[in-house]
Image: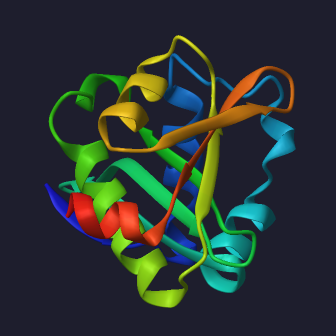
Amino acid sequence: MQFREARADDIAQIQRVRHSVNENVLSDPALVPDSDVLDYITQRGKGWVCEDGERIVGFSIADVKGNNIWALFVEPEFERKGIGKKLHQLMLDWYFSQTDKTVWLSTAPRSRAERFYRKAGWTETGIYGKGEIKFEMAKEQWGNNH
């Protein structure tokens, strides 16, 4: 497995991974067009991918302008191999090298993602949108965990 920064020519594979997941499924794939992905990895923040050969099997995207984690997804058949953990580390190390501001994310309750973020040291701070759990991570928390 190789990890590297995401590029514009990765967007088709990033979208394939995003649509392959079993949890936090997009209700309408048109809600996240390629132009949004491009904006988040080139203007608003940065993204990372994990490749198995030429195939992208996971990705993460941090939004430094909105102070949030925009995405962290791994193809179901590649889960439980440490890919999400490494993408999470790369993303948060970069995020906190750019700003001291607390970062937030939201995810579905009772999901593997919820358990992942709790184990990674995120703090639940409430409800976001239509019933998702909102989590936050302060720079000090991240520094103390890594």
Residue 99: percent from left, percent from top: 55, 85
Residue 54: percent from left, percent from top: 26, 58
Left or right of 68, for residue 139:
left
Residue 50 visible in the displayed image: no
Residue 119: percent from left, percent from top: 30, 33
Residue 62 visible in the displayed image: yes
Q: Where is residue 84, by image quadrant?
A: top left
Q: Residue at x 50, y 41 (%)?
A: 123
Q: Who is closer to the viewer here, 23 or 141? A: 141
Left or right of 16, for residue 67:
right
Q: Who is closer to the viewer here, 121 or 79? A: 121
Q: Who is closer to the viewer here, 54 or 27? A: 27
Q: Residue at x 61, y 78 (%)?
A: 45
Q: Where is residue 91, by image quadrant?
A: bottom left
Q: Residue at x 57, y 55 (%)?
A: 12
Residue 62: percent from left, percent from top: 56, 66
Residue at the far top in the pictured view: 110
Which quadrant of the figure contains the N terminus? bottom left
Residue at the far bottom in the pictured view: 98
Q: Residue at x 49, y 77 (%)?
A: 7
Q: Who is closer to the viewer here, 102 or 35? A: 102
Q: Is residue 108 above or below residue 97?
A: above
Left or right of 52, for residue 62:
right
Q: How is the image coloured?
A: rainbow
In this rendering, the count of numbered labels is 0
Which quadrant of the figure contains the C terminus? bottom left
